[in-house]
Image (tube, rainbow, N blue to C red):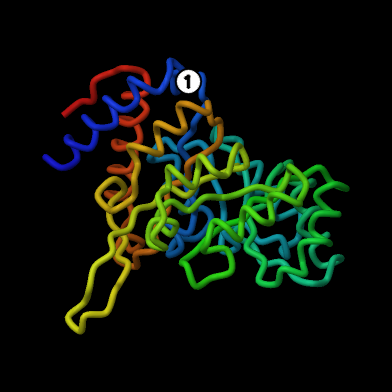
């Protein structure tokens, strides 16, 4: 707990020098990436979000599958909205070299009233067709990152794509994985220069196992190696208005994500409270 309070003191001081944009003005919102609830079905996931008063949902295919009948998915959308919540995006979803197969994702998003799709194309050659669909449907794509050895693990690769593509192609910044890849989340956010559309609120700690092998371990959010103080400074400076969706890769946390999500909410509220100049509750 002392470490958490120390981090919050640091962020409060840093934020005091970062301008006078409040969290409400910045519009930053807390959401849930349903990979966190991968052991639950759709109804259980919605009930879980409702229990924790989370309004914004990013759903994986276990919970919202574009290949399912549209009537079923529209029924799910209606159930979510009846509870005052919103399916704001879905993914990380697969794409392919087949433009018409990708078109189905855009058609699905349009029917569902979803303005952004989170993707991680395996083949760089997919981007020409995907960009054409972005322009045709006026629906954003957000590139998700994993570890350094994956396609978009290095921010330089992502920046090279953003530089030559439509402005509606941006980033879903996975804070845990960008940290595990050895990068500073605050610096990466800043250098993406307004092209971060979404974030995965996650934390990881890099350590070595008994054999000396480097492992990346999911922690409670705010207790790992991610530079959250610096990141929230950048969020405040930019007036970022997206959703930070709570997520974990940990099998143990996913077995019962209640404590993880509750602590993530406390951490998020403390950070945004610091942005507003409010003292966090102990």
Numbered label tally: 1
Q: Residue at x 44, y 23 (%)?
A: 23
Q: Is residue 69 above or below residue 196?
A: below
Q: Residue at x 78, y 46 (%)?
A: 166
User: Crowding near pointer 1: few (<14 within 10 Å), some, many (20+)?
Assistant: few
Q: Residue at x 52, y 64 (%)?
A: 153
Q: Is residue 138 above or below residue 181?
A: above
- Quarter-wise, where is residue 9 in the image? top left
Question: Which of the image's four quarters has the N terminus?
Answer: top left
In-image side of 256 versus 40 (left or right): left
Q: Residue at x 61, y 43 (%)?
A: 87
Of the pair 187 and 238, the residue shown nearer to us: 187
Query: Residue 30: x and y, percent?
Result: 45, 37
In-image side of 174 versus 203 (left or right): right
- Quarter-wise, where is residue 265 in the image? top left
| Residue beneath disc 1 | 24
Query: Residue 188: x and y, percent?
Result: 49, 47
Query: Residue 19: x and y, percent?
Result: 43, 18
Query: Residue 25: x and y, percent?
Result: 51, 19
Which element carries disc 1, helix, strand or loop? helix
Question: Which of the image's four quarters has the C terminus?
Answer: top left
Of the pair 279 and 52, the residue shown nearer to us: 279
């Amino acid at each position: 707990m002392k470490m958490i309070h120390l981090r919050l003191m640091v962020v409060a001081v840093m934020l005091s020098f970062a301008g006078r944009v409040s969290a409400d003005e910045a519009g930053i919102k807390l959401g849930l990436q349903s990979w966190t609830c991968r052991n639950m079905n759709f109804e259980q996931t919605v009930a879980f979000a409702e229990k924790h008063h989370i309004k914004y949902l990013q759903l994986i295919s276990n919970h919202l599958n574009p290949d399912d009948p549209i009537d079923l998915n529209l029924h799910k959308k209606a159930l979510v909205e009846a509870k005052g919540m919103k399916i704001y995006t879905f993914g990380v979803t697969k794409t392919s070299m087949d433009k018409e197969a990708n078109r189905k994702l855009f058609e699905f998003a349009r029917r569902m009233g979803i303005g952004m799709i989170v993707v991680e194309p395996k083949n760089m050659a997919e981007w020409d067709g995907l960009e054409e669909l972005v322009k045709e449907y006026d629906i954003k794509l957000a590139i998700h990152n994993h570890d350094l050895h994956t396609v978009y693990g290095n921010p330089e690769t992502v920046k090279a794509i953003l530089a030559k593509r439509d402005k509606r192609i941006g980033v879903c910044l996975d804070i845990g994985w960008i940290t595990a890849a050895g990068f500073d989340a605050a610096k990466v956010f800043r250098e993406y220069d307004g092209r971060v559309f979404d974030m995965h609120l996650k934390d990881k700690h890099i350590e070595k196992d008994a054999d000396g092998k480097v492992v990346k371990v999911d922690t409670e959010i705010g207790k790992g190696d991610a530079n959250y103080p610096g990141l929230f400074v950048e969020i405040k400076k930019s007036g970022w208005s997206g959703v930070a969706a709570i997520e974990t890769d940990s099998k143990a946390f996913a077995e019962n994500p209640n404590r993880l999500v509750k602590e993530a909410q406390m951490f998020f509220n403390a950070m945004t409270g610091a942005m507003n100049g409010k003292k966090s509750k102990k």
